[in-house]
């Protein structure tokens, strides 16, 4: 491992100034769970790491909003999100997803902002947050931006974040009237990288689907919202037959990829089944709430 500079700024503004450079090997460091693996395997060799652990404590807070929404600071650990009483009360799906996201040692260290900024299409959080209609708020050399989670990822390990631009918080809107579910398929242990991740949210009135979100990851090159499958479901009864049709529409729409966890054809078959199952789970959750 090459020598590198390690800096510990005391504010987010100071960190952004240190990251505002044309040198692409200068990186921010929060939990470092993915970054350290990349450095150990020589995939990435930094010239400078800028630690975010000493910046304002407010960036690790989890704050409920009066309208039922939730703001999660980018430096909140995954364990903090998993065990937050406000998350469990307002966005229970998010807490449930955390329990199968890697292992508890990683969750104790990893931060939600770094998880999203890493851009790994196999992560569980991006599709879940996309289905929940969440945004991220960033801070960078040019000021603040608000970006929908579905617009954050542009390719394999690629995001729209600019050099020196950091995720400051995640904003989850009120989930009143919505019910959601996440279905994860792994080829090994339950907390391993998924071969497929499907997140859904539905909003039903009088047993009719008024609105919905269907999001796939891991089986695709990047997080993908399946808008054709959503369109096939809107206005339909909240029923197993409608969910079956949505699964077929999803299988026809998604561009799945081959990798070590399975062929594209295998993942398409998984998608067909798990979209239906996730929608049924979301409908059941809505009926029992």
Image (tube, rainbow, N blue to C red):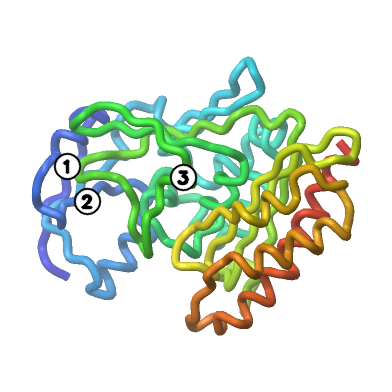
Asked if the residue under mark 3 is in contact with the one under mark 2, i.e. CB atoms within 8 Å, the reply is: no
Q: Please say if 118 is above or below 58.
A: below
Asked if the residue under mark 1 is in contact with the one under mark 2, i.e. CB atoms within 8 Å, the reply is: yes
Question: Which label was assigned to residue 146?
Answer: none
Picture residue at 83% right of the left edge, 56% below the top? 242
Q: Label 3: which residue?
A: 112
Q: Label 1: which residue?
A: 19
Query: Residue 273's spot in the image, x, y percent?
Result: 75, 70
- Mark 2 → mark 3, Cα distance in angstroms: 16 Å
Q: Label 2: which residue?
A: 27
Is 159 positioned to the left or the right of 124 in the image?
Answer: left
Q: Residues within 10 Å of mark 2 (few under 14, many from 20)?
A: many
Quadrant into which the N terminus falls:
bottom left
Q: Residues within 10 Å of mark 3 (few under 14, many from 20)?
A: many
Q: Is residue 212 visible?
A: yes
Q: Secondary structure at mark 3?
A: helix
Q: Secondary structure at mark 1?
A: helix
Q: Please say if 203 is above or below 276.
A: above
Q: Earlier in the sequence, mark 1 or mark 3?
A: 1
Q: Is residue 105 visible?
A: no
Picture residue at 21% right of the left edge, 41% below the top? 164
Q: Please say if 88 is above or below 283.
A: above
Is 228 positioned to the left or the right of 35 in the image?
Answer: right
């Amino acid at each position: 491992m090459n020598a590198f500079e390690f800096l510990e700024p005391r504010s987010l503004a100071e960190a952004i100034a240190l990251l505002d450079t044309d040198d692409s090997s200068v990186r921010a460091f929060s939990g470092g769970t993915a970054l350290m693996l990349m450095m150990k395997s020589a995939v990435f060799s930094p010239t400078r790491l800028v630690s975010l652990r000493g910046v304002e404590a407010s960036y690790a807070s989890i704050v409920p909003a009066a309208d039922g929404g939730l703001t999660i600071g980018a430096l909140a650990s995954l364990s903090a999100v998993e065990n937050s009483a406000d998350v469990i009360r307002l966005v229970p799906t998010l807490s449930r997803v955390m329990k199968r996201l890697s292992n508890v040692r990683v969750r104790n260290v990893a931060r939600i902002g770094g998880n999203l900024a890493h851009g790994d299409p196999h992560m569980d959080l991006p599709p879940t947050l996309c289905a929940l209609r969440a945004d991220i708020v960033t801070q960078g050399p040019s000021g603040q931006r608000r970006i929908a989670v579905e617009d954050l990822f542009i390719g394999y390990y690629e995001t729209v974040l600019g050099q020196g631009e950091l995720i400051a918080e995640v904003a989850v809107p009120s989930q009143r009237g919505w019910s959601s579910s996440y279905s994860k398929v792994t080829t090994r242990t339950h907390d391993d990288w998924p071969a497929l991740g499907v997140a859904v949210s539905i909003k039903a009135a009088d047993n009719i689907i008024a609105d919905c979100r269907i999001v796939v990851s891991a089986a695709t090159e990047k997080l993908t919202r399946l808008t054709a499958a959503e369109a096939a479901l809107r206005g339909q009864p909240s029923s197993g037959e409608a969910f079956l049709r949505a699964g077929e529409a999803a299988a026809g729409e998604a561009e799945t990829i081959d990798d070590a966890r399975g062929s594209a054809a295998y993942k398409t078959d998984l998608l067909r089944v798990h979209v239906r199952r996730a929608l049924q789970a979301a409908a059941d959750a809505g009926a029992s709430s």
